Amino acid sequence: MELEEHVAVAAAARPLHAVAIPLPAQGHLNPLMRLCRALASRHGFLITFVNIQPIHDRILDCMQNHPTGPDAAQDGHPVRSPPLPIRRVSLPINGLDLENDFRLSFADFLIATRSLSNPLESFLQSIGEEGSGLPPVTCLISDNFMSGAVQNVAEKLGIPWVSYFPCSQSMNLLYFYTHTGRVPLQDAIHLSMDRDKPMELFKDDLPGLPPLYNRDMPPYKHVVEESPRIIPLMVDLSRISNEKASAILVNTFKEIEGEAMWAMAEQLITPPIFGIGPLVEVLEEESSTDLWKEESHCLQWLDAQPAQSVLYISFGSITLLSSQQFGAILDGLQASGHRFLWAFRPDLVEGHATDEAIHENMLPQEFVEATRDRSCFVEWAPQVRVLNHSSVRGFLTHCGWNSTIEAIAAGVPMLCWPYLCDQHTDAKFIVEVWKVGLRFEAPSSKGGIIDSREVESVVRALMEGEEGLVLRKHSALLRQSALSSLQAAGFSNRQLQAFVQHICNISS
């Protein structure tokens, strides 16, 4: 019997119900919802998508202008059913202050998520009560970085727990080598904080990974320097997943990270690891997880631009730019002469209020006048649609894994501006391994500031140079691999089927 038939028979025998728990941050919400949609649409799962109260309310607020409205739910009771069986519920959380958006301590953020354990346990117990009207929970699927809150609950209630790793498999493998001792923890902490020195080789003997240098290691400096606190937390969460999970899912595919997948699979006794990406589906209204309201009018602006003429710019949901760096970017963009669409969060620049409009006191009048006919600013863009638009030629990105894999699937070359965490490792692969991007250089002699001439030069290299043509050829080939992986007989589609069969087997 074919794998598809096995899965269909198992699903028909009993209802499949997955409870999904994301890390409550934009770059983690989107991929988990995409996974949930794939399980619901292709494999008949009922999904209960659990968010913390403030994030839940914020998403619903961003969705309120959609004509179809959200599948809102409070305390597990849905208001109405969406096209797919995906229920949203909210649970309370203690010790997390989002008053200043994500300008906060990441270590405190991760620690606060552990308070979700008790409400989650009570909620899961209520599902099993008579009269709940819900099938038993087949499995819990949580973001890897929620392992501290979820794993003990799953073990206590006897529910299979699946860890979803939201970053690259290479980063997953690096954490694996750290918690198993092949990469000394203190060395990882030291190098993550030592980024202004010249290139220094760190490791060149890690199976599944290319040689790593000091600038390739993940730093954790956002509002404050937190590498000594964050890295041990990250490594411990990786250890919990690798030792306790029933399965590990990663948003990747064979052609870009096959070596990293095989290297980890060969060294893990359990659990099995599945590459089920690229997950790049557009999240329609009923499945939206946006924390800012999308401004789709930018698509009409793109429609009016020549083909392959626009640089799309987005620094993601967390990046903070200093005023000096912001000014250098503006000067470089102005000097480049190229069209650009910028997804510009109100809280992107240090020293500005999180609710300040883009045009108020942030953009110099000279810049506004000089770029008026070739620029478009929005607070939040429908990124997947933008990247797949025929007018877009390149993507200036912070190299978050979502943005990286969305650009790969769209065949758009990247200009790499990594900010923190895995983004520096992603940039290495984009530029040196897959050869689909260029990197800005920030000399230590200038305090780590990338000057306007560097911005102009790199933008021109991608948008008009021979180097840019080569990158586009590489990007087109990688795009074909990504799309093939999602076909019925493709690697990632088969991996998702194998995962469902695995869950059916262990939950029967």
Image (cartoon, grey):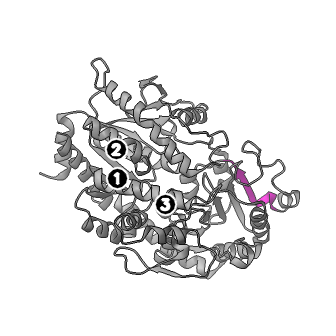
From the viewer's perspective, tell me whether residue 15 is left or right of residue 418: left
Relative image position of residue 443 (x, y in whole percent):
69, 78
CB of mark 1 within 8 Å of CB of mark 2? Answer: yes
Q: Which mark is residue 151?
A: 2
From the viewer's perspective, tell me whether residue 349 is left or right of residue 484: right
Q: What residue type is labelled 1?
A: Ile
**Most foreground residue, 333 or 133:** 133
Q: Which mark is residue 240?
A: 1
**Most foreground residue, 381 or 132:** 132
Q: Which amino acid does label 2 sit on?
A: Gln
Marks 2 and 3, Cα distance to the nearest angstrom? 20 Å
- What is the quadrant of residue 392 in the picture? bottom right
Relative image position of residue 203 (x, y in whole percent):
43, 79
Quarter containing the C terminus? top left
Q: How crowded is mark 2: few (under 14 residues within 10 Å), some or many (20 or more)?
A: many
Q: How crowded is mark 3: few (under 14 residues within 10 Å), some or many (20 or more)?
A: many
Q: Compared to 468, does 2 lie above or below?
A: above
**Most foreground residue, 45 or 100:** 100
Write down the residue under mark 3: 231
From the viewer's perspective, tell me whether residue 249 is left or right of residue 146: left
Marks 1 and 2, Cα distance to the nearest angstrom? 8 Å
Relative image position of residue 276 (x, y in whole percent):
35, 56
Relative image position of residue 136 (x, y in whole percent):
26, 30
Q: Earlier in the sequence, mark 3 or mark 1?
A: 3
Q: Which of marks 2 and 3 is nearer the N terminus?
A: 2
SS of the residue at dot 3? helix
Q: What stretch is highlighted in magenta?
A: 371-379
Q: What residue type is labelled 3?
A: Ile
SS of the residue at dot 2? helix
Q: Residue placed at 38% from the left, 43% from the top?
A: 36
Marks 3 and 1, Cα distance to the nearest angstrom? 14 Å
